[in-house]
C-alpha cells in the first residue's frame, strides 16, 4: 500500500520534492518547442526556406503585434472569467493548450523549400501565430500559478530555481545535440530534420505537462471577491506599468532573452565562420548555461539570508565583468580563442545564474505586490503582460541581431562568411551580450523595489 503523503497545518500535501519536480516539468514542456524555435526558427526560414533576412526581420516584428493582442487577450479572459473549473483555471488552460502547442510547433518547421514564396510566407505566418497562441495559453497560467503554490519566500525561490532547471533540462540538449546532428562536413545544416525533431519534442512536452497537471497543489487561497468585480483590462495594464516590482522582474528576463536569442543566430555563424567549429556552437552555449545550475541548491538559503534582490544584484556584477572582458581580451580565430570565449562565458553564466534562478520567484512576488498596492489580485493579466515583454525580447532579439549582422556584411547565401565579416560578427555577438547584461543589472539593482525587509512587510500585510 502506498504511503500517505504528509500534510501541512491547512491539510495540503507538505511542500517538497514533488512540488519542485512538478513545476520544473512545466517549464520543460514549454521549452520543448520554445528552445527549438528560439534557436532555429530564424535560420530555418532564412537559410533553408530562403526568405529574405530583412523581410523576415520585419515579419518577426509584425508577429510581436500579434503577441501584444494574444497575451493580454488570454490573460484578461482568465482573470475576468467567473466560471468554475474542475482543475482550476490555471491547469484547465494548460491542459487544452498543451495539445495545440505540439501541433503548431511542427507546422513552424514544415520542410517545403521548393514551394512558392507566397506559400512559404503564409505557412510561416500561420505556424507562428498558432504556435504563439498555444504557447500563451500554456505559459501564462504556468507562470502565474507559482504565486498560488506557496507564499513562503524560500519555497518560491526554490520553485523559480527548479523552473529554470526544467528549462535547462530541455534547452541544453537541444542546444548541444542538435548542432552536432544537423551539421554536415562542409558546415551546412540539414534543416529538413527539424520537423521530426519538433514532433518528438512535442510528445515529450505533452508528457511533461500532464505530469505537472496531475501533481500540482495550490496552497495559497486568494480573495474570491476580486472575481466579482467588473474586469478592466486598461486599468490592469495601467497597474502593471505602475508596479515597480513587475517592471523590474520583467526587465530581468527581457535582458537575458535579448542576449540569449539576439546573439544565438550570430553565435552559430561566428563559430562556423570565425572559429571554424560550427558543431561546437551548441556546446559553447551549454557551457555558458551550466553555471546557472550551481545556484539551484543555494536558492532557498540565499533568499532566507540575503533576499532575492540583494543576492541576484550582487551576482549580476560578475556577468557584466565577464561581458566587458569578452570585448576587451583578443580572441584569435582558433581553439585558443574558443577557450578564451568559453572561460568568459562561464564568468558571465555564473553572474547571470543567480538572477535567472530568482527572476521567476520575483514575478510571483510582483503579483502579490500588485494586490498590496492596488487592492486587486490579477495573476493572469499581470503575468500575461510580463510574458508579452519576455516574448517581445525573444522575438525582437533575433530580429535586432539579424539586422546588425546584415549591417556588418553578413550574406545568408554563403555557407562560411569572409574573415573580415566574421570578425565584425564576433564583436556584434559580444557587444550585444554586454548591453543585455547591463540591462539585467539595472533592473535588479534600481527598479525592483522588494528588498528583504519590504517583502517581509508585504507578506505580513497580506497575511500570507
Image (spheres, grey):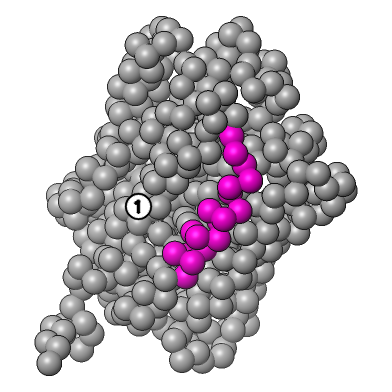
Magenta stretch containing residue 15, yes or no?
no
Give the residues drawn in magenta, as a range.
189-206
Tally of numbered discs: 1
- Residue 104: percent from left, percent from top: 64, 63
- Residue 176: percent from left, percent from top: 41, 39
Q: Is residue 310 left or right of residue 256?
A: left
The image quadrant of residue 70 is: bottom right
Q: Which residue is mark 1?
A: 169
Q: Residue at x 27, y 37 (%)?
A: 291
- Residue 190: percent from left, percent from top: 60, 39
- Residue 390: percent from left, percent from top: 54, 50
- For disc 1, the neighbor class at 10 Å (few under 14, some 14 to 19, many from 20) is some
Q: Residue at x 50, y 49 (%)?
A: 35
Outermost residue to the front: 185
* Residue 94 visible (yes or no): yes
Magenta stretch containing residue 194, yes or no?
yes
Q: Residue at x 77, y 55 (%)?
A: 123
Q: Residue at x 48, y 87 (%)?
A: 225
* Residue 79 visible (yes or no): no
The image quadrant of residue 240 is: bottom right
Against 459, is 58 above or below? above
Amino acid at each position: 500500500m502506498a504511503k500517505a503523503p504528509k500534510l501541512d497545518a491547512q491539510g495540503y500535501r507538505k511542500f517538497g520534492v514533488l512540488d519542485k519536480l512538478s513545476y520544473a516539468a512545466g517549464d520543460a514542456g514549454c521549452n520543448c518547442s520554445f528552445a527549438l524555435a528560439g534557436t532555429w526558427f530564424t535560420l530555418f526560414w532564412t537559410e533553408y526556406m530562403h526568405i529574405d533576412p530583412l523581410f523576415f526581420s520585419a515579419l518577426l516584428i509584425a508577429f510581436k503585434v500579434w503577441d501584444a493582442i494574444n497575451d493580454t487577450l488570454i490573460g484578461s479572459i482568465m482573470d475576468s472569467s467567473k466560471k468554475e473549473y474542475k482543475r482550476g483555471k490555471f491547469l484547465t488552460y494548460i491542459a487544452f493548450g498543451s495539445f495545440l502547442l505540439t501541433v503548431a510547433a511542427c507546422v513552424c518547421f514544415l520542410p517545403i523549400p521548393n514551394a512558392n514564396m507566397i506559400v512559404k510566407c503564409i505557412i510561416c505566418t500561420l505556424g507562428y501565430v498558432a504556435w504563439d497562441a498555444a504557447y500563451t495559453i500554456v505559459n501564462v497560467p504556468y507562470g502565474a500559478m507559482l504565486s498560488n503554490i506557496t507564499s513562503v519566500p524560500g519555497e518560491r525561490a526554490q520553485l523559480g530555481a527548479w523552473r529554470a532547471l526544467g528549462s535547462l533540462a530541455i534547452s541544453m540538449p537541444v542546444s548541444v545535440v542538435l548542432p552536432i546532428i544537423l551539421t554536415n562536413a562542409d558546415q551546412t545544416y540539414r534543416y529538413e530534420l527539424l520537423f521530426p525533431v519538433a514532433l518528438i519534442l512535442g510528445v515529450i512536452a505533452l508528457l511533461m505537462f500532464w505530469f505537472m497537471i496531475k501533481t500540482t497543489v495550490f496552497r495559497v487561497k486568494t480573495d474570491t471577491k476580486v472575481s466579482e468585480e467588473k474586469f478592466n483590462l486598461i486599468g490592469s495594464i495601467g497597474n502593471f506599468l505602475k508596479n515597480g516590482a513587475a517592471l523590474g522582474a520583467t526587465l530581468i528576463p527581457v535582458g537575458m532573452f535579448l542576449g540569449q536569442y539576439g546573439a544565438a543566430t550570430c553565435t552559430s555563424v561566428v563559430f562556423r565562420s570565425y572559429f571554424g567549429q560550427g558543431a561546437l556552437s551548441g556546446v559553447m552555449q551549454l557551457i555558458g548555461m551550466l553555471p546557472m545550475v550551481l545556484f539551484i541548491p543555494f536558492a532557498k538559503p540565499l533568499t532566507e539570508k540575503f533576499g532575492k534582490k540583494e543576492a541576484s544584484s550582487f551576482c549580476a556584477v560578475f556577468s557584466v565583468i565577464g561581458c566587458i572582458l569578452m570585448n576587451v581580451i583578443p580572441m584569435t580565430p582558433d581553439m585558443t580563442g574558443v577557450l578564451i570565449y568559453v572561460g568568459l562565458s562561464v564568468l558571465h553564466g555564473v553572474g547571470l545564474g543567480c538572477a535567472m534562478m530568482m527572476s521567476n520567484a520575483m514575478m510571483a512576488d510582483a503579483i502579490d505586490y500588485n494586490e498590496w498596492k492596488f487592492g486587486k489580485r490579477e495573476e493572469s493579466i499581470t503575468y500575461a503582460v510580463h510574458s508579452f515583454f519576455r516574448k517581445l525580447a525573444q522575438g525582437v532579439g533575433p530580429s535586432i541581431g539579424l539586422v546588425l549582422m546584415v549591417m556588418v556584411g553578413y550574406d545568408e547565401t554563403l555557407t562560411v562568411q569572409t574573415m573580415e565579416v566574421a570578425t565584425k560578427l564576433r564583436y556584434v555577438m559580444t557587444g550585444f551580450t554586454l548591453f543585455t547584461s547591463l540591462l539585467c543589472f539595472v533592473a535588479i539593482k534600481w527598479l525592483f523595489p522588494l528588498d528583504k525587509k519590504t517583502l517581509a512587510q508585504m507578506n505580513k500585510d497580506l497575511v500570507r
